Image (spheres, rainbow, N blue to C red):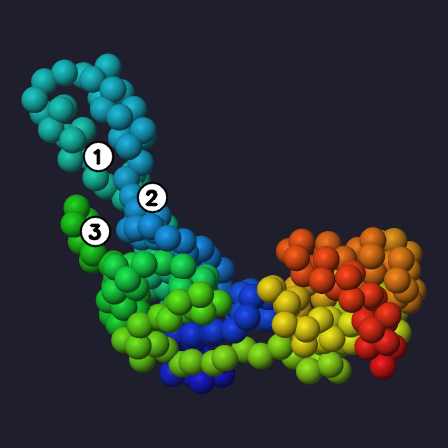
Amino acid sequence: MFLALRLQRPLFLEGEAGVGKTEVAKVLSRWSGGELLRLQCYEGIDVAQAVYEWDYSRQLLHLRAAELTGSGAEVAARAENELFSERFLVRRPLLQAIADAGDADAPPPVLLIDEVDRADDEFEAFLLEILSDYAVTVPELGTFRAAVPPVVVLTSNRTRDVHDALKRRCLYHWVEHPDFEREVQIVLRRVPEVEEGLARQVAGAVRRMRGLGLYKPPGVAETIDWAHALAVLGRSRLDESSIDRTLGTVLKYREDAERLRAGGLEDLLEAAGA
């Protein structure tokens, strides 16, 4: 993170879902004071969703208003010229990040490009161009260029391999699950109403689950959710009943929950106690 800020390079984070990749961008935004601009990637995402589009409904209303207030070629020409001005431009996260990074006195925005592995090859190529020059061209208005590059964080759950050309533009880091003591501290910070003994039990049980080869091992986000659910139920320690009742907060696939219940919950309790 330090090098990404000093070198003004995008930070590319890969890792299992729920390990805290997205949280990095949120923390950077809170720490720096820069606005957080999040672009959630998905299959089929295009320029209109990521960069900009025109507000067609407002443009149509503008034309109708011009027709009501006057007539003649001069009025029509003026109304048409105003159609593609910035007042009708809808800025999406990529354009916002570049256009808003021009003020040297304000902290640069933090651009989060989340789950870039879900986008397709064409969008990756477009991102490559954006991250190389930090510039976006709107044909009707010209080129927007960032005087100071935004802070860029890209995340990937590695559902597919992202092209090397995009990774070369970034600083790369694989985010591991935290070790036991660090996960306990994360739970205590995020769920302060949880007693330390319960936090240690929850972290120990989750650590055991991750070693069972489940279809979807729980991440840190699920550890926090589980601890929070137990606190809401007024539990101060784990037992078979509390695990069974709250398993849906930590395991999100029926097959994983059935496998855990079929093997008995004693092993999980033993890991939690250890």
What distance separates the C-alpha of mark 3 from that of mark 1? 14 Å
Residue identifier under label 2: 90
Labels 2 and 3 touching (C-beta < 8 A): no
- The kind of secondary structure element at disc 1 is helix
Q: Which residue is denoted by mark 3 in the rendering?
A: 138
Amino acid type of the residue that numbered disc 2 sits on in the rendered structure:
Val
Label 2 and label 3: CA atoms lie apart by 11 Å
Count how many numbered circles sit on residues in the image.
3
- Above or below, 144 against 10 in this view is above
* Residue beneath the point at 39% across and 74% down: 10
Under circle 2, the secondary element is strand
What is the secondary structure assignment of the residue under circle 3?
strand
Q: Residues within 10 Å of mark 2 (few under 14, many from 20)?
A: some
Q: Where is residue 187 in the image (x, y as percent from the top left)?
A: 75, 70
Which residue is disc 1 drawn over? 83
Which residue does the image show at 54% across and 78% down from the upper left?
175
Q: Nearer the viewer, residue 257 or 96?
A: 257
